[in-house]
Image (spheres, rainbow, N blue to C red):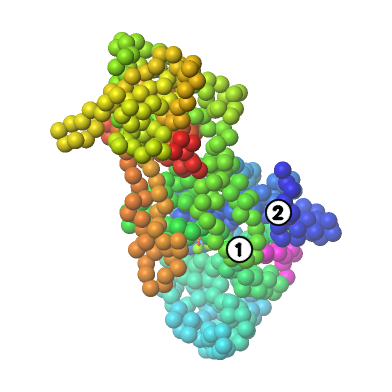
Amino acid sequence: TNSKPLDFIRQIIANDLATGKHKTVVTRFPPEPNGFLHIGHAKSICLNFGIAAENNATCHLRFDDTNPDKESTEYVESIKQDVRWLGFDWGPHLYYASDYFDQLHDFAVRLITMGKAYVCHLSGDEIREYRGTLTEPGKESPYRDRSVEENLDLFARMRAGEFDEGACVLRARIDMASPNIVLRDPVLYRILKSTHHRTGDRWCIYPMYDFTHCLSDMLENITHSLCTLEFENNRALYDWVLDTLKTPNHPRQIEFARLNINYTVTSKRKLLQLVSEGHVAGWNDPRMLTISGLRRRGYTPASIRNFCATVGIGRRESWIDMGVLENAVRDDLNSHAQRVLGVLDPLKIVLTNYPGNQTEELIAQNHPQNPDMGTRILPFSRELYIERTDFMQDAPKKFFRLSVGREVRLRYAYLITCQEAVKDDQGRIVELRCTYDPATKGGNAPDGRKVKGTIHWVSAPHALEAEIRLYDRLFTAEYPDADKEKDFKDFLNPDSLTILTSCMLEPGLGQATIDDRFQFERQGYFCLDSESRSSSGKPVFNRIVTLRDSWAK
Ligand code: ATP
Ligand code: MG
Ligand code: MG
């Protein structure tokens, strides 16, 4: 199965193992628990856990929880659930950056002692201003040349809570003229008088990402620290911290292109806005490309892993078409989803020559291409539902479905001919009167006459009434966050959700469980919604994805 050439990261790792630079590999997936995971995170999860699995090595799950204002235990739990659901296991290797707060503090004190860090009282705005630009060097802070003793004292008082938020920060003392702006005396610690979801009120100073991440990697003996390209400039700081502290080991940061998918946004900050402003029903709204949304929608873990494998790992930013993701779930479900019959927009038909009190049991295949999946029984009777769109008045010649005077095949049943369309006062068709040919059981005529169209149906007295939710893309614009003049929410698709309240399904679907996936023939792939029953108690099904083509257009 693995005929693809290794991506550049796997090549580096294979080489490091071959040359003996490393005896084994240790990777990590380091989410910040400030939201639910999305499809972009799946790429990083598949990469880090995938590399570990391929090398019989370990991948750590580490919560990068250094920002108490935005983080919570709820997010921690959702992330664990999502990683597990995707099929990965961190074993005993569950870590939190907050577990390292004491050690990180000691490293900061060491930097101060080395003259490599100082307490700075410039405001946030001033720090930004002093930092300079790509074309202009920065300006040194007036607090830059304080003595080690003064800095140690001030940092201790920061920690003791003597200063207000924003009154001062601890900064690395590197180079205000560096061509890499990240190295212009970056902030290492800030004051935040907030309660942390794990350490409570023990700390009122919190380490910044760039200081925390490299040291956490180091403390966990990570060999390869894989992150997205926006951290490329931060690598110099990652290396500076570890080099300056002369740490016993030094993980290698390698950047890869983040996953971008069109017609959606993959940023926790923006997804959070959709949730908190009520544009969607929650983090697990089936239209959201969060892992929990995809799960509820009916995506399988395998389909998401396959998608990530298809996309691959590279160093060039690119956009993936939403259709690639949809294809991944189609391909997966096509091979194993049971086929069933379900009518989304029912139109009743009466077979006038079928005995009124008779019920037959017809045999249907669960997967026409895979006989091993067996058969099931479909009840058949005088009154049936078909899809309203499978009937047309004054139909053109090429319409191979039902029209008055035309014959069509009912899937797994009989050939029927429409005799009359019954209308109500407004002229709307409410019922079709048809006749069936008893000699065509199974769908073929003994006289060999050809009937092109085949349509699906459900026996009316046996039907399971259900609600079905159809989903479309959440945004109408291909790149909803590209237009800097506009808000990405201006491009929300008003028709992204369609609710059909009186669908008629074959009765066996009453036994469906949350884990089942079905192909409703000619309609797409569906699953039970894990969160809801309709207000009237009917089961609710989600359409996962449409079929590539319907086989009887
Ligand atoms: P967001 O920008 O959505 O808030 P983030 O990068 O801040 O995401 P983290 O929780 O810090 O979110 O991410 C954990 C890991 O997942 C990081 O290593 C990050 O690089 C990776 N990651 C996040 N988004 C993507 C993406 N779109 N493609 C690939 N990897 C991603
Ligand atoms: Mg982040
Ligand atoms: Mg982010």
Mark 1 packing: few (<14 Cα in 10 Å), some, or many (20+)?
some
In this picture, which residue range is highlighted in magenta? Answer: 245-256
| Disc 1 residue lies near ligand 1 with CB under 8 A | yes
- Residue in the image at 32% along x and 41% along y: 499
Q: Which of 535 and 29 lies nearest the eye of the viewer?
A: 535
Mark 2 packing: few (<14 Cα in 10 Å), some, or many (20+)?
many
* Mark 2 element type: strand
Task: Check if residue 255 falls in the magenta segment.
Answer: yes
Residue 236, percent from left and from top: 66, 74
Q: Which residue is mark 1?
A: 257
Question: Which three-letter amino acid code belongs to the residue tagged 2?
Answer: Val
Residue 199 is left or right of residue 430, and the answer is: right
Q: Which residue is mark 2?
A: 26
Question: Which three-letter amino acid code belongs to the residue tagged 1?
Answer: Ala
- Residue in the image at 68% along x and 71% along y: 239
Residue 231 is left or right of residue 128, and the answer is: right
Residue 468 to residue 37: above or below: above
Residue 450 to residue 545: above or below: above
